[in-house]
Image: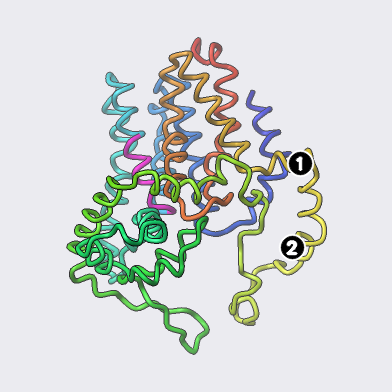
Amino acid sequence: WLYSIICVYALHPLFPIVSLYITKDGFFAYAFLLYFATIFDLLLTSGNALKKLDFVVLHILSIVFVCLTRHQGFYIVVLESLLLLLYYRKQWYAVLYSTLPAILAVVLFNNVLLPRLDVEPSNKKEMYGMLFQQTAYYLTQHPDDVTKSEICAIRGVMDPDMIVKKYQYNLVDDVKSCYVYTEKGEDQPDGMLHFRHVDHTGEKEALSAYRTAWFSMFLRHPVTYIEATCAVIGGFFYNVGPQIYYLDSNWDKSELATNSNFTFGHFDVFINFYNRYLSRILALPLLSVLFSLPYYIWCTLLILGVLVCRLDMRGLALSLPIILSIGVLLLCPVATGRYEWPIIMCLPLLFVYAKQGNNFKNQ
């Protein structure tokens, strides 16, 4: 089964394409696969892998990498670690020393070191993006069913008129960009974009009032919120979004791409090859299925359903990071392949576990 996994990663055309993507989503996908592989090894050896120092070091590094590349990584790691503590209650100390140092290191890095270095914290609009999208859609559908207090609460975090104008049914970015506590970019002579700090005074109170208004509006028209959410994430579950091989990058159009001080290998050669040949080849009837967003989600859900029917607790413990990653899709600002990569990366391993279930149980 190990050789079959290697063949999938080596021969499936999706993985070489993903390897060219060097943004946070690409790095997170690689880190997520490494973390998932250590969990896979830990569970298949019934926790005996924790007795090896090299495995513990690798597991700690994978946790740090996952947590620092995307914010949801921290929550996935914490929840998976708690589940492993329950699953290996008799070996709780081994699980603890293989996860706690990494989690503490990430907490100290984010909450002590970065503030000391005067680094701007992550913006709240990323967490509230879907809520803002639901509010914008609500205002387009029920403009006369909003109280003055709700309008005031919304205005405390964004301009109600502006979010109605900028609303797009399948994209959250335009609406969340109206968040009043957003960093503003300033062009500098060096060609780089510099961001200034934001005054967060009153932000917590404004968000608290907004959440109250959001919930009261939800109680009156819950279906409206559901419609707004489905319009954004529908491409993950139904084939209405872009293909996974869609070139989700504007590097060739950026100012840095034409700046002689910054180079990106032979990116222009790749762009030419992609536009002329690769996109056409991957759009062929059979190959296009392999690059369809819903295909991988439904395959994953099918495998999870098999594990549930088997009452395979070890398999479900292995699957928790993937289950949580599917949950994260419900908050994504747009249905595009880069948000699905962590799930796709781990799907071959999950498939092999489901297929070899009884054999693994006997190990």
Note whether 286 is above or below 221 in the view shown.
above
Note whether 304 is above or below 192 in the view shown.
above
- Give the image location of residue 302, x and y in percent: 55, 25
**Picture quadrant of residue 116:** bottom left
**Picture quadrant of residue 270:** bottom right
- Which mark, residue 270? 2
Note whether 293 is above or below 80 in the view shown.
below
Indicate left or right for 118 with 266 as reference. Answer: left
- Dot 1 crowding, Cα within 10 Å, few <14, some 14–19, many 20+: few
Residue type at mark 2: give it: Phe
Q: Which residues are magenta?
A: 69-79
Alpha carbon of mark 2 to alpha carbon of mark 1: how far?
A: 20 Å
Q: Does dot 1 land on a helix, a strand or a loop?
A: helix
- Give the image location of residue 297, x and y in percent: 56, 36
* Foreground residue among 95 and 343: 343
Q: Chief secondary structure of the magenta span?
A: helix
Residue type at mark 1: give it: Leu
Image color mode? rainbow
* Foreground residue among 276 and 40: 276
- Give the image location of residue 309, x and y in percent: 48, 15
Q: Residue at x 64, y 56 (%)?
A: 20
Q: Residue at x 18, y 68 (%)?
A: 202
Magenta span has 47?
no
Q: Residue at x 37, y 71 (%)?
A: 161
- Dot 2 crowding, Cα within 10 Å, few <14, some 14–19, many 20+: few
Are the residues at dot 2 and dot 1 in contact (C-beta closer than 8 Å)? no
Q: Which residue is mark 1?
A: 287
- Give the image location of residue 292, x and y in percent: 66, 43
